[in-house]
Image: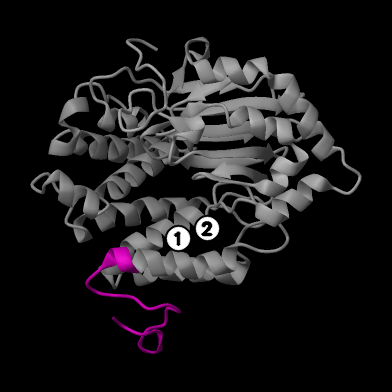
């Protein structure tokens, strides 16, 4: 290890382990990013530190993954909400550079591929180059970014871990981790909610959820903010100040303070085996503010996500893109998403949007007693 006194960076780093460096860099910048204003962001000085980390990676290749993650997670937006495009370009390039540093090629075993975080290196490079190709104003540059993105996808198809999906992934937006787990099962970004029992259940009790949420939101003591501050989520996906969460249950741990003020919501959710028997369940109320955006990102497998818009008064003003599919939130109507596909969110309206969102066990996962049936079609 090289100490900070021997290096201009303000955290320890290793020339042997870029995964160690990733952890140390994220730990350092998390402390700068989260702040009491609920506008999670870096100030200008700390943004410059992130940029400097990217420059240091040009000299120290073992810093490439750390710098790529920091620029992606913490330096996508200025505190004003402005997208810092040059940081996204640098992040894509650094994820690309980290591939060689991590020894990620088609000769290694699937176990080594996973241990060396090769999914992240390739997946993030392909995702960011694809986003850049979709959004660049210059036609030649758009084509160049898209070519890079498809190059990573095509290489993945030569890797043994991806043999089962090589013929079905024809675009970087087809990448998803559930299909790697269940290559012979149906896969699509947005499922037919009418065929998912949890979706029907949530729609049936929509008015119950809404009544308790409205009581929280309209409480004269700003109860929603009290709950958020007491046990809120931390994230680095959204426009600063544009998105926050109240935890209901996470990895089996229920938020007692929330359940005291919304007892019917908790009681109903506790009846669902897809949730209570799922070790990685994560159920929250998400609040998305007007003009907020969530950058493109992947979720982890094996799981699906249910979104019930509980308060969304502008049905054509907020929506989600999952893979190549797009949808809008409508109050009382559940969306079932495979969020292991690349996905992003935008809100173009004037009123906050509140969604009851929960991860739940994938119906084809045979390792948990979720009491769902793996579908033949979706």
Main SS, magenta region, reads loop
Q: Is residue 142 visible?
A: yes
Residue farthest along the right direction in this orientation: 220
Looking at the rendered structure, which numbered label has been put on residue 70? 1
Would residue 3 be counted in the magenta stretch?
A: yes
Residue 348 on image: x %, y %: 69, 31
Quadrant position of residue 314:
top right
Q: Is residue 213 left or right of residue 117?
A: right
Which of these two is toward me, 217 or 55?
Answer: 217
Identify the residue at image location x=31%, y=33%. 367
Q: With 228 as the anchor, is 123 left or right in this view?
A: left
Q: Tell me the SS state at disc 2.
A: helix
In which quadrant is the N terminus drawn?
bottom left
Residue occupied by mark 2:
74
Tell me, yes or no, whether the two marked residues, 2 and 1, touch with CB atoms within 8 Å.
Answer: yes
| Residue 26 drawn at (x, y percent) | 45, 64
Q: Residues within 10 Å of mark 2 (few under 14, many from 20)?
A: many
Extent of the magenta region:
1-20
Residue 173: in magenta span: no
Q: Position of residue 66 (x, y in %)?
A: 37, 63
Q: How is the image coloured?
A: one colour
**Image side of residue 164 versus residue 196, left or right:** left
Say which residue appears at 42% left-offset and 34% top-offset. Answer: 342
Q: Is residue 326 above or below residue 92?
A: above
Compared across the picture, whether 102 is left or right of 40 comes to left
């Amino acid at each position: 290890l090289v100490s900070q006194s021997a290096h201009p960076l303000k955290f320890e780093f290793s020339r042997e382990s870029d995964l160690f460096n990733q952890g140390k860099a994220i730990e350092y910048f998390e402390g700068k990013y989260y702040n009491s204003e609920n506008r999670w962001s870096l100030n200008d000085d700390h943004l410059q530190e992130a940029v400097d980390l990217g420059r240091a990676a040009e000299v120290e290749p073992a810093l490439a993954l750390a710098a790529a993650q920091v620029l992606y997670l913490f330096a996508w937006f200025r505190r004003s909400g402005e997208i810092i495009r040059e940081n996204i370009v640098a992040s894509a390039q650094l994820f690309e550079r980290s591939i060689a540093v991590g020894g990620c090629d088609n000769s290694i075993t699937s176990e080594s591929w996973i241990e060396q975080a090769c999914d992240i290196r390739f997946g993030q490079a392909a995702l960011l180059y694809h986003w850049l190709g979709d959004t660049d104003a210059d036609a030649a540059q758009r084509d160049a970014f898209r070519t890079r993105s498809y190059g990573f996808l095509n290489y993945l198809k030569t890797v043994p871990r991806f043999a089962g999906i090589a013929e079905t992934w024809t675009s970087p937006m087809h990448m998803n981790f559930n299909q790697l787990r269940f290559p012979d099962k149906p896969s699509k970004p947005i499922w037919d909610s009418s065929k998912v029992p949890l979706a029907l259940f949530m729609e049936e009790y929509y008015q119950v959820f809404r009544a308790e949420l409205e009581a929280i939101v309209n409480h004269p003591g700003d109860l929603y903010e009290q709950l958020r501050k007491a046990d809120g989520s931390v994230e680095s996906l959204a426009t600063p100040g544009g998105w926050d969460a109240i935890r209901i249950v996470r990895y089996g741990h229920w938020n007692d303070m929330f359940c005291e003020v919304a007892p019917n919501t908790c009681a109903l959710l506790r009846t669902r085996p897809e949730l209570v028997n799922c070790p990685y369940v994560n159920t929250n109320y998400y609040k998305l503010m007007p003009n907020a955006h969530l950058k493109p990102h992947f979720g982890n497998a094996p799981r699906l996500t249910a979104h019930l818009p509980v308060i969304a008064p502008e049905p054509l003003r907020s929506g989600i893109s999952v893979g190549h599919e797009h949808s809008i939130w409508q109050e009382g109507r559940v969306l079932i998403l495979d969020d292991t596909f690349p996905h992003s969110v935008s809100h173009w309206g004037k009123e906050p949007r509140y969604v009851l969102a929960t991860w739940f066990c994938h119906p084809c996962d045979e390792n948990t007693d979720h009491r769902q049936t793996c579908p033949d079609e979706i």
